[in-house]
Image (spheres, rainbow, N blue to C red):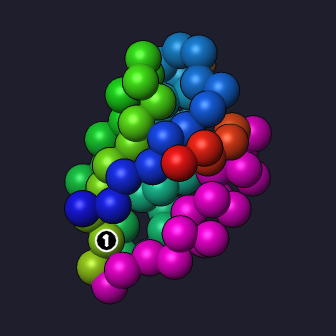
Amino acid sequence: MPAITVKGMSCNHCVMSVTKALEALPGVSGVKVDLLSGKASFEADPPVDPAVVKKAIEKIGFEVVG
Ligand SMILES: [Cu+2]
């Protein structure tokens, strides 16, 4: 299961935005985003390109730091 760390989330609205952005990617499901740690994990079948994930997160105003 891929996991990323998202920087810049400050409330549950941000969590929802990130969750929706990830779920919108082809093959991605089961998205879990933790507000405090910034950790986001998900299932991806077929695997999703990390660059595509990064771009989707940056598009909505957040940063992927790991
Ligand atoms: Cu927010």
Q: Quadrant of residue 19?
A: top left
Question: Looking at the image, which residue is at 39% across and 43% down?
Answer: 40
Q: Quadrant of residue 43?
A: bottom left
Can residue 54 be seen by looking at this rendering? yes
Q: Residue 3 placed where, x, y %?
A: 36, 52
Q: Is residue 21 above or below residue 34?
A: below
Total marks shown come to: 1
Picture quadrant of ligand 1? top right
Q: Amino acid at mark 1?
A: Ala
Q: Quadrant of residue 56?
A: bottom right
Residue most extreme to the bottom: 46
Question: Looking at the image, which residue is at 51% across and 77% down?
Answer: 49
Q: Which residues are magenta?
A: 46-61
Q: Residue 4 placed where, x, y %?
A: 45, 49
Q: Nearer the viewer, residue 20 or 8?
A: 8
Asked whether mark 1 and ligand 1 are closer than 8 Å, the reply comes as no
Q: Is residue 50 above or below residue 46?
A: above
Q: Nearer the viewer, residue 24 or 63?
A: 63
Residue at numbered disc 1: 44
Q: Residue 14 placed where, x, y %?
A: 56, 27
Q: Is residue 19 left or right of residue 58?
A: left
Magenta segment: does it hold 55?
A: yes
Magenta segment: does it hold 13?
A: no
Q: Is residue 33 left or right of residue 62?
A: left
Name the secondary structure under disc 1: strand
Question: Looking at the image, which residue is at 49% across and 41% down?
Answer: 5
Prevailing secondary structure class for the magenta stretch in the rendered image: helix
Q: Is residue 40 left or right of residue 13?
A: left
Q: Is residue 10 left or right of residue 42?
A: right
Question: Looking at the image, which residue is at 24% across and 62% down?
Answer: 1
